Image (cartoon, grey):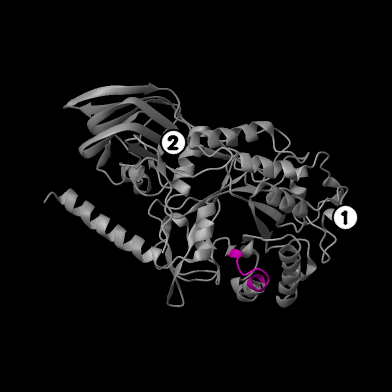
């Protein structure tokens, strides 16, 4: 038998066994989360009014002053854009609360605009038929008990606030904890907090950001692209994994080790709509990610029982900006989920692990050509010059009519703790396919940018593909090249028991 076919069959058998094993261990509650699948993250708070991502708990309450606050419109937009749920920031790292909490004076009740934002969003979710999840920062830079040597007073403070959130606003589908780096892992007393949440709302799923550790070592974070079956869970108990804003591998594992017991953990991706990677809205209008990139990221992040939540932050007026609303509507139209509907899956990617070579590459093995079609969207190939060609052997004749290219940018720090400006280099390229022993140029283009989807009007029985980078403003890098035969609509499948 052909060695490549043997390897393929072996991999297929392992994959089937893996999927069967994983499917046996997913719970009904986790299945409900997978079926939600696509949510809108809403970052809004005192940071929105101060041009900052993280603040220190000392920003004046007077600065929180939305003059057109309309949470109902946020959820209405989410419904129209095809989201199944929203996750609202209740308290970020600075400690400012979007509800009137009895346990702090750093909240909306002490600000110029006293509207209980949690209540308004909860009402709108009920009105439009969406579920509600809540983000809550463990780290609190305003609350004095946070920094006491004894962690229990602050744990009690958190439990009191969580009681408010879980008893006053109806059903909450998930609690999303963040900021655990501010203390030793054990100081958060996650088992105690988790039990408290489940007592109040048994069907509320819980996570702590940076969920998986390196070799079980406390305080360490294993990136999603490096996670393997059997890795140690850092925080326990939890119901799913997160590590913002990273992307899981296409062959993302699901079974993790907790004290020798196998646990099934979904990965919930958190992505920014803004192409500047800012969570809180800024005063200046910033461009949204391109539609091609959003479409392909949707397929990637919702595959394999995983989830995508896309951050769409209201501005300092309390409104979602028109151009960002339009972009998520455009995405919904392309995905066929405007106003609701069954989630699509992308065409089957035929490029994974195919033999590939380049005319030149960077001398660092970290960026070698094998990264261009591996299972990770966070590894990448870098050329050794401003021009290069990449040739992929399709092994056997395959009909292809769709090609996707993700370019890796140079990122420039915008000095607000998170935001970056992405600079792309390629400004002239071509695609060739080998058909019947002859190279045919099937596409000529200028910029690639974050992602380029090339839909060919006819299918080609091609044995090889070649990407020619004809001109680049600097040394180019590519995250991934995908190829497919896009002949019918595919729908996202949920692996059940």
- Neighbour tally class for label 2: few under 14, some 14-19, many 20 plus, Cα within 10 Å: many
Q: In front of the other: label 1 or label 2?
A: 1
Please name whichever residue, 141 or 359, is drawn nearer the observer in this view of the structure.
141
| 253 to the left or right of 8 | right
Q: Label 1: which residue? A: 110
The quarter of the rendered structure image containing the C terminus is bottom left
Q: In the image, which residues are magenta?
A: 197-206
Count of residue discs: 2
Please report the residue visible at 72 percent of the width from the left and 71 percent of the height from the top: 159
CA–CA distance between discs 1 and 2?
A: 47 Å
Which tag, 1 or 2, sits closer to the chain's start?
A: 1
Question: Residue 220, image x and y in percent?
Answer: 52, 65
Q: Which residue is mark 2?
A: 407
The label number, if any, that marks residue 307 in the structure image: none
Q: Work out whether 306 lies above or below 298.
A: below
Q: Is residue 39 visible?
A: yes
Q: Is residue 201 magenta?
A: yes
Q: SS of the residue at dot 2?
A: strand
Name which quarter of the figure residue 289 lies in.
top right
Relative to the observer, which residue lies in front, 252 or 285? 252
Left/right of residue 226 with respect to residue 324 in the rendered view: left
Image marks 1 and 2: residues in contact by CB distance under 8 Å:
no
Does residue 386 belong to the magenta stretch?
A: no
Q: Position of residue 79 (x, y in %)?
A: 63, 43
Instruction: Tell me where residue 91 appears, x and y as whole percent.
Output: 72, 57
**Is label 1 in a helix, a strand or a loop?**
helix
State the image coordinates of residue 202 (x, y, percent, origin top left).
62, 70
Give left or right: position of 492 versus 416.
left
Instruction: Name the one closer to the observer, 426 or 308.
Output: 308
Residue shown at 54%/37% (left/top)? 332
């Amino acid at each position: 038998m052909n060695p490549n076919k043997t390897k393929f069959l072996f991999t297929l058998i392992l994959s089937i066994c893996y999927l069967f094993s994983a499917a046996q261990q997913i719970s009904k509650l986790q299945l409900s989360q997978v079926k939600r699948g696509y949510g809108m993250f809403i970052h809004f708070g005192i940071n929105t009014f101060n041009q900052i991502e993280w603040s220190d708990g000392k920003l004046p309450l007077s600065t929180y002053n939305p003059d057109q606050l309309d949470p109902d419109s946020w959820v209405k937009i989410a419904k129209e854009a095809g989201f199944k749920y929203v996750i609202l920031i209740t308290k970020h790292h600075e400690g400012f609360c979007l509800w009137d909490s009895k346990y702090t004076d750093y909240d909306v009740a002490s600000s110029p605009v006293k509207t209980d934002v949690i209540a308004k969003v909860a009402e709108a979710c009920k009105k439009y038929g969406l579920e509600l999840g809540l983000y809550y920062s463990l780290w609190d830079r305003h609350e004095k008990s946070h920094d006491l040597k004894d962690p229990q007073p602050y744990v009690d403070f958190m439990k009191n606030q969580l009681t408010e959130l879980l008893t006053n606003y109806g059903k909450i589908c998930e609690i999303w904890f963040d900021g655990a780096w501010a203390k030793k892992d054990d100081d958060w007393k996650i088992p105690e907090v988790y039990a408290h949440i489940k007592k109040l709302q048994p069907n509320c799923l819980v996570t702590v950001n940076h969920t998986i550790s390196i070799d079980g070592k406390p305080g360490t974070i294993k990136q999603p692209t490096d996670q393997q079956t059997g890795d140690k869970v850092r925080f326990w108990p939890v119901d799913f994994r997160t590590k913002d804003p990273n992307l899981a591998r296409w062959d993302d594992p699901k079974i993790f080790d907790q004290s020798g017991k196998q646990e099934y953990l979904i990965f919930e991706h958190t992505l920014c709509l803004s192409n500047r990677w800012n969570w809180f809205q800024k005063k200046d209008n910033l461009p949204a990610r391109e539609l091609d990139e959003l479409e392909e990221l949707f397929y990637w992040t919702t595959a394999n029982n995983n989830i995508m939540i896309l951050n769409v932050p209201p501005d300092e007026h309390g409104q979602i900006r028109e151009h960002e609303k339009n972009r998520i509507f455009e995405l919904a139209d392309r995905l066929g989920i405007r106003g609701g509907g069954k989630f699509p899956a992308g065409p089957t990617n035929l490029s994974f692990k195919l033999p590939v070579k380049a005319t030149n590459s960077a001398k660092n093995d970290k960026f070698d050509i094998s990264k261009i079609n591996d299972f990770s969207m966070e590894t990448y190939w870098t050329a050794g010059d401003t021009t290069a060609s990449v040739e992929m052997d399709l092994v056997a004749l395959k009909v292809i009519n769709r090609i996707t290219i993700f370019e890796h940018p140079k990122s420039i720090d915008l000095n607000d703790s998170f935001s970056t400006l992405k600079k792309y280099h390629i400004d002239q390229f071509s695609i060739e396919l080998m058909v019947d022993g002859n190279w045919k140029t099937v596409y000529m283009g200028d910029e690639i940018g974050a992602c380029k989807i090339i839909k060919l009007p006819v299918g080609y029985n091609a044995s090889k593909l070649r990407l020619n980078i004809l001109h680049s403003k600097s040394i180019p890098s590519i995250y991934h090249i995908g190829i497919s035969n896009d002949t019918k609509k595919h729908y996202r499948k949920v692996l059940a028991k």
